[in-house]
Amino acid sequence: MRRPVLPLVVLTGALALTGCSDSDSGGISVSGAYIPQPVSADMAAGFLTIANDSGTKDELTSVTSDDGEVTMHETVGGAMEEVSRLSLPAHGQLVFKSGGNHLMFDKLKSKPKQGQTVSVELHFTKSDPVVVKMPVKSATYVPKTGH
Ligand SMILES: [Cu+2]
């Protein structure tokens, strides 16, 4: 992959502008990532919001983790379905939340416990991969929506 080598001073300026996001790769930022501490030993769900600040639409094509297998699920009419890609609109968001889209962890090497983090890598059609450290919250954790 070819990327322009930017002078350090330009990179520093870009980092300062985007310093409030959890992680950042070009126009992609991730917020609100968490995994409710699972009941079962080797399966868990994960939630996060991916924002696309660029004017180009993108797609999330896979999620990987060294800790286990990860699949992307949609909830359709109360039933969940595995999907191979999810669209990320230009200047839009892709939201994973309880009752909707979610990440499904399977074959986990160890059961995630509250206070730990699970590292995942998000892969996109256009953007560079983004690594997210997802904190494990209590089994009953409900995120603040901000609305
Ligand atoms: Cu699922």
Image (cartoon, rainbow, N blue to C red):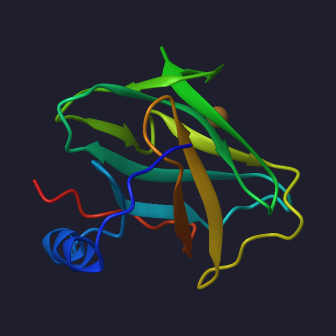
Quarter of the rendered image showing ligand 1: top right
Residue 30 spot, x, y in % from top left: 36, 57
The quarter of the picture where residue 11 lies is bottom left
The single residue placed furthest to the top in the displayed view is 77
Q: Residue at x 54, y 61 (%)?
A: 131
The single residue placed furthest to the bottom in the displayed view is 115
Left or right: residue 68 compared with residue 4:
right
Left or right: residue 124 compared with residue 67:
left
The quarter of the picture where residue 62 lies is top right
Left or right: residue 78 compared with residue 72:
left
Q: Nearer the viewer, residue 45 or 93?
A: 93
Q: Nearer the viewer, residue 110 or 40?
A: 110
Q: Residue at x 50, y 66 (%)?
A: 140
Task: Give above or below for 79 relative to 54.
Answer: above
Q: Residue at x 44, y 50 (%)?
A: 3
Residue 8 spot, x, y in % from top left: 29, 78
Residue 51 spot, x, y in % from top left: 28, 46
Residue 65 spot, x, y in % from top left: 73, 56
